[in-house]
Image (cartoon, rainbow, N blue to C red):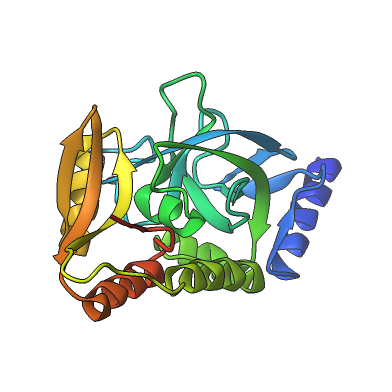
Amino acid sequence: MRSSARALSLAFALAACGHARESGGAILSAGGGLYGSYQDTGAASWYGDELSGNRTASGEAFDPDAMTAAHRTLPLGSFVEVTSIETGRSILVRINDRGPGRRDRMIDLSRAAAHMLGTDRHQVATVRIRAIVPSVRDASLLRAGKAVALQPAAYTRAMSIDTLRSRAPMTLVPGRRYLLQVATFSNEARATALAKRLDADVVEGGGLYRVRIGPFKDAISLQRARDAVAERGYGDAQVL
């Protein structure tokens, strides 16, 4: 009984001091239950409008725009930090569902979470996750489905690189019409959802669905579109 009380006291102390802390072997309180130190690296997939409104294991309706995730064993209502191995970005999400259904995947993210990580252009990405105790403020934001500003310097740096890449000088051939390819998916529903958000078109070929904007007949309009999608996290859009 005393050890349980000490564990709970430690959990609340961690929550009170700092932005978010790794569990580091201590027993943490989350969602009314207890869980130990957890961190792992594996595959993350994501879901969007195709599952919007479906009932989750927590009883909530799935919202693709909320910062949530599904995990097989972590307690519902607990929180994890997710870091993309490819982009280096980190986010916080709340576990509100069970999954993934595929055994070769470790965690399912919402579309919003995948977008903040910069991994939503692929169906699967390699990530590192760790159980954390967020501050009271951050926990409140996450329960409301909102994003938490985590490691702002690293995130800003990643966004700036995307933006600078998009603003690299372009050499255009006079009279030619150009397209801007934002992303490529193997899932038609996801390509269609992104196309709607960007007012773009979906072009199918070879079992892949490419999200494209255009054609553009002048460099100014093409550059504006390129900058606009970069600001939304698609700094590696290709000019065709």
Name, please, the residue furthest toward the top.
Answer: 103
Name, please, the residue furthest toward the front.
Answer: 174
Q: Quadrant of residue 207?
A: top left
Task: Give the answer, above or below, for where 55 lies relative to 10.
Answer: above
- Residue at point 73% right, 58% down? 21
**Coordinates of residue 179 in the picture (x, y in percent):** 22, 59
- Residue at point 59% right, 41% down? 127
- The quarter in which the N terminus is drawn is top right
**Coordinates of residue 184 in the picture (x, y in percent):** 31, 43
Q: Quadrant of residue 69?
A: top left
**Coordinates of residue 111 in the picture (x, y in percent):** 36, 50
**Coordinates of residue 66 in the picture (x, y in percent):** 37, 56
Visible in this render: residue 68?
Answer: yes
Q: Quadrant of residue 189?
A: top left
- Residue at point 33% right, 38% down? 56
Visible in this render: residue 54?
Answer: no
- Residue at point 18% right, 64% down? 176
Q: Could you tell whether 227 is left or right of 139 in the image?
A: left
Closest to the observer: 237 or 32?
A: 237
Closest to the observer: 178 or 52?
A: 178
Q: Could you tell whether 97 is left or right of 19 in the image?
A: left
- The quarter in which the C terminus is drawn is bottom left
